[in-house]
Image (cartoon, coloured by chain):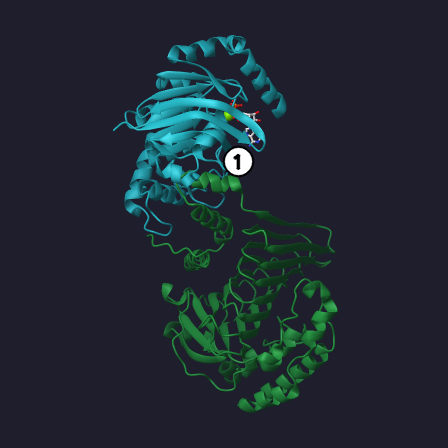
Chain colours: A cyan, B green
Amino acid sequence: MNSLLKITDLHVSVGETPILRGVTMEIRQGEIHALMGPNGSGKSTLAYALAGHPNYTVTNGSIEIDGVNVTEMEADERARLGLFLAFQYPVVIPGVKVADFLRHAVSNVRNPERKEGEGLIGMREFRKEIRDRMTELGMDHEFARRYLNEGFSGGEKKRMEILQLAMLQPRFAILDETDSGLDSDAVRVVSEGLAKLSGPQMGVLIITHHERLLEFNPPQFTHVMLGGRIVETGDSSLAHELHANGYADVRARHPQAAAENIQAEAATA
Amino acid sequence: MATATADILRVGYDSEVFENFLRSRREPQWMTEARRAAFEIYQSLLETDLDPEEFKRLDLRAFNAAKYRPALVASQSEEVSALLSDKTEFGGTIAHVDGYVTGSRLSAELAATGVLFGDLQSLLESHRELLEPYFLKKAVRVDADRFAAWHAAFWTGGTLLYVPRNVEVSLPLHSLIAHRQDGIADFSHTLIILEDGARATLLEETTSVTPETAGLHVGCVELIVGRNACLRYVQLQNWNQKTWHFAHQAGNVDANASLQWTVVGLGSRVAHIHQDINLDGRASTAEVNGVTFASDRQKISYYTQQHHRQQGTHSDLLYREVLRDDSRVIWRGMIKVDKVAQQTDGYQRSDALMLSETARCDSIPGLEIEADDVRCTHGATTGQVDREQIFYCMSRGMTRKEAMHMIVEGFFQTVYDRIPIEVVRETLSRTVQSKLGFETISQ
Ligand SMILES: Nc1ncnc2c1ncn2[C@@H]1O[C@H](COP(=O)(O)OP(=O)(O)OP(=O)(O)O)[C@@H](O)[C@H]1O
Ligand SMILES: [Mg+2]
């Protein structure tokens, strides 16, 4: 069966401020979508809203996975349904070892019915698995024993997100600028890693300002966000065009959205 | 409020209680005389106010000493389950119930090296010359405050550990102090003496046999660490939530010696711990760890002093507190550096994590420094659980509660990392989890 993540006319506010103004998008398992757009256009907002961040209020529209409306669900329920967000800014969890954190995460996501305190995935099986994935991503095994993201460099944090992606094998993965802050070797490792991990079992939404990740993972669809709306959708050639020429043409074609985006940028500054 | 508190507390044990108590004891005259002297001090201290700096933040108005009496006869002995006891191998163990020793054991090898371990009362009698000069004379002074004097008049039961010169006790020792009957006051005492070059680890825990019995503990801990000696002492306070806990504790560390002292506060209704760390000898070091988890309406209060009395001394205190529900935690910490104590490092830090809006924490660090060539830092933080951390955990499939537990565990981990005793780390982690209402069936 081919799963479907369906986003319909999604309006999202932060506090009283509307950010997303009607986003519609369908991502099927096995597809790769690129989401581009200038700073402040609402890409991360979409990512957070999909993952269920409590500060991002859906004021209209819906998010469905295979017909199940997840709009009101807590983040953990969505994760158990197979949704994964690689954070633009991964969070430090002081004192919690990567391995312990991931063992709990894996146990929940693989056994969605699991109640708190119920059995975790077997230690031995888990250890082997995490080691294998770390080797594939060129990570020192020592990382498993470190505290999650504590003292990690920017690039190490991003790699840690990919390790989590590899361990959790979601049906839908949203990667929010996972390629920024990485040196060129690391971009390559992460790009190749994603290419290996994705495939027919995973629908991927790649948010990026760079080209490298998309070279290894060519998108079937490219969406351009401006002022909280998807203003254009095309194939991978659209991504190339935007990389080459920037957003001036897009802004010119969509003056209303461009004006709203500028307001958002001004509000942030 | 300070005066109201003091007035209530002035109603203490009267001489009738004391004489009854004395009649129940069969002890040598010198011991009885020491008790009488302490009782007099106690009575005169009842007339004075408690040190406001130490007690003004702690509301003791609900405390009524008359509700609790020392047990005059030993209760039936029974097995009391302990958190630490069957988790590892111990070189010796001792257990007390309601102020009476119910059993103690020391391995034959350790006994052969001259180590003394067991019932304080009988060892004080049999080794008076060796032990009397230390008991309530070096570390805790009888007239330190009314709790110390009260304890010195009524102490019963207790754990003694004496390690002769250069003897190394590699297996940890275990001491259990339990409360069983309702309305009983426990005055147990812990005295540890390490002669020069000796090494030992004592893990001590307090517990109540049932959650319902109301109790009082007025305790004392004295740690005397000789030159070049090394002591690790852990006290895990896990009374039920109907117990009042007052403890006067002091550690004296001689030249080049080290003390690692871990204080865990999980239980009790109201607890007040006075903890003195005295760096008496040159280049002595002390590491002090605190793990406190308060819930419901518990009030847990600490008054800590790191007193640097000699040159080149080092002290490092790290307390971490988690507060839930309507609980309250108070930490008043002080680093004192005497004029002679040059080239001294003193650190103190207390961090509190609040899990509810209605909990309250006061952390007040302080410095009193008379030397000029010192490095001292102090700090205190209080914060709510970070919502971004919770969201991050939840986005990986953990429920909100599980996320909280993970974050609380992580918060304590920094302190656990300083405790080199695995059984302690594991037990703490398990106990904290169960207090969070979270049993791990893992491994
Ligand atoms: N938690 C928040 N609080 C206040 N404003 C927010 C919050 N999250 C997003 N916004 C605002 O919403 C707008 C869109 O932000 P968002 O982070 O989604 O942009 P983005 O497209 O991801 O940008 P970038 O490319 O810089 O990462 C911005 O104006 C931003 O300031
Ligand atoms: Mg963004």
Asked if B28 appears above or below A169 in the picture, the reply is: below
Asked if B122 appears above or below A6 in the picture, the reply is: below
Helix, strand or loop at label 1? It is loop
Where in the figure is residue B263, as x and y percent of width and height? 53, 61
Q: Which residue is mark 1?
A: A55
When asked about the image quadrant of residue B440, the answer is bottom left
Where in the figure is residue A36, as x and y percent of width and height? 46, 18
Given residues B130 and A254, the one toward you in this image is A254
- Quarter of the N terminus of chain B within the rendering: bottom right
Given residues B235 and A264, the one toward you in this image is A264
Given residues B16 and A41, the one toward you in this image is A41
Q: Is residue A169 visible?
A: yes
Left or right of B80 on screen, residue B288 = right
Where in the figure is residue A208, as x and y percent of width and height? 45, 21
Label 1 lies in what chain?
A
Q: Residue at x 29, y 47 (%)?
A: A122
Where in the figure is residue B191, as x and y percent of width and height? 54, 73
The amino acid at mark 1 is Asn
Q: Is mark 1 within 8 Å of ligand 1?
A: yes
